[in-house]
Amino acid sequence: MSLRMALTSALRRAPRTASARLPSTARMTISSTTAPFAASTVGSHRGARPRPVVAAHVRHGVRPASSFTLSAAETATASSTADIDVDAAKAAAAAQGEAVRSLKEAAKKGDATKDDVDAAVKKLLELKAIVEQLENPAAAAAAEDAGAKAKDASSAAPSAGKDVGVTPKSQDFSRWYLDVIRECELADYGPARGTMVIRPYGYAIWEAIQRWMDADFKKSGVQNAYFPQLIPYSFITKEASHVEGFSPELALVTRGGGKELEEPLVVRPTSETIVNNMFTQWIQSYRDLPILINQWANVHRWEMRTRPFIRTLEFLWQEGHTAHATAEEAEARAVQMIDCYRRFAETVAAMPVIVGRKSRVESFAGAERTYTIEAMMGDGKALQAGTSHNLGRNFSKAFDTTFLDEKGETRYVYQSSWGVSTRLIGGIIMTHGDDAGLRLPPALAPVQVVVVPIAQKNKDEAAVATAANAIAATLENAGIRVKVDDDDRNSPGWKFAQWEMKGVPIRVEVGPKDVAKDACVVARRDRPGKEGKEFGVAVEPSSLVAKIRGTLDDVQGTYLAQAKAFRDANVVDVTTYDELVAAIDAGKWARGGWEGSDEDEKRVKEETGATIRCFPFEQPAGPHACIMSGAPAKEVCIFAKSY
């Protein structure tokens, strides 16, 4: 008979009082961390397959399993504690605690093994969990109910993984991505096909992107403005390549006020046309130049295949528009802005990117040249994370946007446009996330540090809470984004896993022993388990702030280094078309010389699904040969499948 069975039998005294039940509307999931996950169609989009409701959504004491949390043995099922006397269970736990201490002393002398100690600790955690559930019968009963429901529903549900709150990346990358977005409460599906609702946690990431970008734009003289969302259709048709490129994606308004409109209105897909309409009115002479404008707005593109953050019918972005007197100024601005995006990606998002020029086929409709930053996602696909366009005089000629130069001659302005969008959030998820969920770079994380107080009920709670709040105040005063999770409905282990899943870079734990030592425990998101924990960290304000800031910087650097190592390991050099095909089939990026035609490029896309991502600014030393023809090539390009 196991210790647990023996104790359960020996400790039976009087029947436990009837457990209080949660309201029937309370949303619960499973009680066991290893049982199948329940299925739910709550919030599902247009008849999609049932989505797993995993332990991340539990709000009443059942926590998800995680490598960043306590042992799964810490939690015990409510059914195993039925009819056990609370005082007797506490006595058994105390006795087991003494046994653990004795074994540890014996191990130091060589009279006990590590396995003996580990087994005793495991049983101690089980007993403590039994005591905890006996003292909180409502949560235990709710967990029982939820476990039964999960068992009934799991037979019809797709597998969501055994011990994690999201589908493992290696098992199903696409499902993992959607699980992370849902369980971390970043976004949800909108009621109209292809739309999404950005939830507060996801929008906080967008706000962090906005803050950095907006400040950097303004340093170079860019000013914010706003242009109408509805654009006359005739504006779109003025630039031939522009209308050809965007026609399939346009959303049109044809009725208003109960009547047919004389001219359809386009719901903004981008704003080059309406901006030029206004520039024509604002620009008279060279003294009015340059004009450097940015707007933060939403845009609509009628996409057929959508994915949250990556490709939706409506999304948020910034779009910059400039007008210049010379071609050189417009080119310099286009290059300057793609470098701005590179700096953001690498220093803030910890996302290594390859900066380069798009091919003619892949360039923006109406641009002379398009520059891009390309990032590799966790599945090896490329993500175009930002673009900057040298528009030349294509739009100014279409709209007659002219100025009088210093000689009094009428000339067309030269222009640039550039933008990034909420697609960046999807890129951050797919670059850094792991099986446990999000891993947010500290520079962007809405919460950089979560403080978790750990105390027994009605014992040491006040002292621990005071210490936790003092730690939070110290960090907040230093400009660090911090949150205290003092919700007493959930166990510390549940909180550990919850905040790990939401990607918080640092967790600070404080318990009675820490309070006595004026110390705390610091755990890092980038290093799971004990490896990422540091005990006895002093809470003296200057020392603590220095420690946390240094750790945040280190986590930021670790994420960038890991992503760069992954990318570099998955870029292969190719010299022939067969090598290119093999590289793409293996999920790699293929880098090789290119002098092919537009038709050659389209053939590669048709046969492999890969496109030219860019001609990198940083070119390897030559000579190079075209992978299609073998002829000498001036440049190398990168082919990859992409989002």
Image: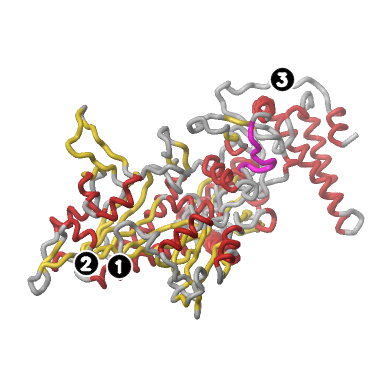
Three-letter code for the amino acid on which mark 1 is drawn: Arg
- Percent position (x, y) of residue 272? 26, 54
Camera-side mark, 2 or 3: 2
Dot 2: element: strand
Using the image, determine if residue 335 lies above or below residue 101. below
The reply to whether residue 554 is visible in this rendering is no
Q: Circle 3 sits on which residue? A: 17
Q: Which residue corresponds to mark 2?
A: 324
Q: Which of marks 2 and 3 is nearer the N terminus?
A: 3
Q: Are marks 2 and 1 in contact (CB under 8 Å)?
A: yes
Q: Nearer the viewer, residue 323 or 138?
A: 323
Q: Residues within 10 Å of mark 3 (few under 14, many from 20)?
A: few
Asked if residue 376 is among those painted magenta in the image, a careful observer would answer no
Name which residue type carries label 3. Thr
User: Regarding mark 1 in the picture, which secondary structure is present there?
Assistant: helix
- Find residue 375 and report its horizontal and vertical position in percent: 49, 60
In space, the residues marked 2 and 1 are separated at their CA atoms by 9 Å
The type of colouring in the image is secondary structure
Residue at label 1?
A: 333
- Mark 1 or 3: the one toward you: 1
- x and y percentages locating residue 640 in the rendered image: 51, 60
- Say whether residue 194 is left or right of residue 35: left
